[in-house]
Image: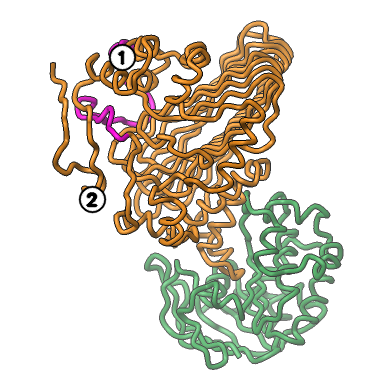
Amino acid sequence: MLKIQNLSVYKNDKKLLNDINIEIKNKEIVAIMGPNGSGKTTLSRAVINDPELKKEGKIFLDDLDITDLPTEEIAKYIYVAHQSPPEMEYIKTSILLKYLGIDINDIKEYVNKLGLPKDLLERAVNNRLSGGEKKKFELLLMLPKKYKVIILDEIDSGLDIDSLNTVNDIILEKSKESSIIIITHYTRIFKKFSPDRVYILYNGKVVYDGGGEIIEKIDKDGYRIFKD
Amino acid sequence: MDTEFLKISKESQWFESKYKPELELKGELSEDIVKTISEIKEEPEWMLKNRIDGLKAFRKLDIPDWGPEINIDFNNLIYYALPTIYPKPVKWEELPGFIRETYRRLGLTKEYIEKYLGGAVLQFDSSPIYEKINKYLDSLGVVFTSLDTAIKEYPELVKKYFGKVISPYENKFAALNTAVWSGGVFIYVPKGIEVDIPLHAYFRINLENVGQFERTLIIVEEGAKVSYVEGCSAPIYSTGSLHAAVVEAYVHKGGELNYYTIQNWSKNVYNLVTKRGYGEGNNIIRWVSLELGSKVTMLYPSLVLNDNSIGEIYSLSYATDGQILDTGGRLFIKGKNVRATIVSKGISIGEKTEAKSVNRTDVKIFKGAENSYVKSSCESLLIGKGIAESIPRFEVYEDKTYYNHEAKMEIIDKEKLFYLKSKGISEKEALKLAVFGFFEDVTEKLPDIYRLEIKRLLDIELEKYGGIG
């Protein structure tokens, strides 16, 4: 269970998140939605303790207080598929995989399935990958290991419809062993399945905490329904 | 005459006052000092003449008006000290703490050092491998000795080649070296001989090769082939503030030379070094260096290439807080059908203060160097407060030729470190990945003995990294 308790987050003295309370049970699929700039990505970065962010409040993973654990420690339990992964010019993908203890044979099938470039392993990390391909690479890296929580940050943006279907399959498969948090401002990823619960973030605050029925409403009227 | 001629009886200074030279020549550089050095070494007249030429050039030339700032008080330098083996603490306890720590990390214990290194910091004395290698080299007719010994045993060879590749007028520090050089290596490979093991400075005993003004001379005869590895496992602490070495290599027709070096002086030293290989034609000359130590380094290994030759220069540098490593390479393309490359790669890791690496490449293609292909590239990897500069230069006098320059820069910023941390990789490991990845395309081409040494030394350097995040 991931429990975010009274969390406020600051960057350079600017308050980005305000008194957030979120609870995600084991193997739940939870959506965190909201318009651009509402604090969704900040939340995912705060969970894995981005040293650039200042925090008030607590974050627990089961009974473990992970609020101030180093990012690389938290990474043992929580996987974040980043919204905009950086290119690492001089780090070869195959070397990164080796460092992460990932056996290439375990992921080969998915390199093809996800439509990632055949020379992926020989390339530098994220080098010459399109936005959609970077997202797929983020998914690829989480496949061989078992995590308590997986956070997918805007995983659906930049993906074509076929890829989106593959991604949906992967999410459903992974949800058998992990809690999944889907961060998105689109609703289209929920055409094939519904999240167990939805949180709506607006201006750094949780303004909705409830069932998936809200998605249809957002689809129709947009996030402005949460204005004040 | 301001010359100070000091017979030292009381304790003088080498790190923590443990080094006692019997004789020190210091003060304003004069003909007296130069003559005295030559006399002590019982040199022939022609070598003294070389030294005097060096002195004249030294007086005429200024320090470079470009590049890093150089503050050296030439009137306060020790030009010669007896014994010339530089810091040579006798006991483990006398080694500075950081050197002890380095040896420990290299897996060398106090007992090992005292037993096998005879207390010397550098030389692997009297090991069986040394004798074996000597016998083998003798059977090939290869000479691998100190330059001082070579002057006595092979005077004609030294006389013929000394200063032939690097003139004292090359720069002020080459001039200074010519005037006061001591220590250094002499290598001679006879016609047609291919030496299939890399010659390593470790294999030689009593090379006085850790002096400030060492001089190395390499001669490769027609069709001969040799690799030379010059380097040191541990940082060498120097009392002198200046290291001004000269390395010259003359490669006859069809000869092949691979020169590998690691510079790891302590971080209080100006390392202003001149190195050049000359090829008569049909040569393969490969020149690789890794610069780790010193406060300021200026080193631009250069190759002079004639017809049908392949020349490669790989300059690697790793600068941390407070260091300026200004390096790269120079190519002089004089003949037809030359294939030549300079790859200059600098890492700058500034944790608390600036660290700077400069990639300086200089290519001159002479008229008549038809059908030559020359490529240069400058690459920088920046971390924290590290900064870098790339300064390429081309001078081309031949139309029927091809040349190209590339420059690349990669910054490992907090965002990239965060990304790797979020995958479970610590900052130190992340840095390791980046540093080894950055050098990989060069290091994978190197012989094991050199590549492993680089890896070991970088591992030690990277251990010291505290983080910028």
Amino acid type of the residue that numbered disc 2 sits on in the rendered structure = Glu
- Give percent across and percent down for residue B381: 53, 46
Query: Dot 2: few (<14), some (14–19), or many (≥20) neighbours within 10 Å?
Result: few
Question: Which sits in the foreground, A97 or B42?
Answer: B42
Residue that appears at 75% across and 84% down: A175
Left or right for B147, reference A216 = left
Question: What's the colour of chain B in the image?
Answer: orange
Q: Is residue B9 above or below residue A84?
A: above
The mark found on residue B55 in the picture is: 1
- Give percent across and percent down for residue A202: 54, 76
The mark found on residue B16 in the picture is: 2
Q: Is residue B338 visible?
A: no
Give me the chain letter of mark 2.
B
- Give percent across and percent down for residue A18: 45, 79
Which of the 4 image quarters holds residue B196? top right
Residue that appears at 80% across and 52% down: A119
Left or right for B266, reference B21 = right
Query: Dot 1: few (<14), some (14–19), or many (≥20) neighbours within 10 Å?
Result: many
Instruction: Note the chain letter of the green one.
Output: A
Which of the 4 image quarters holds residue B46? top left
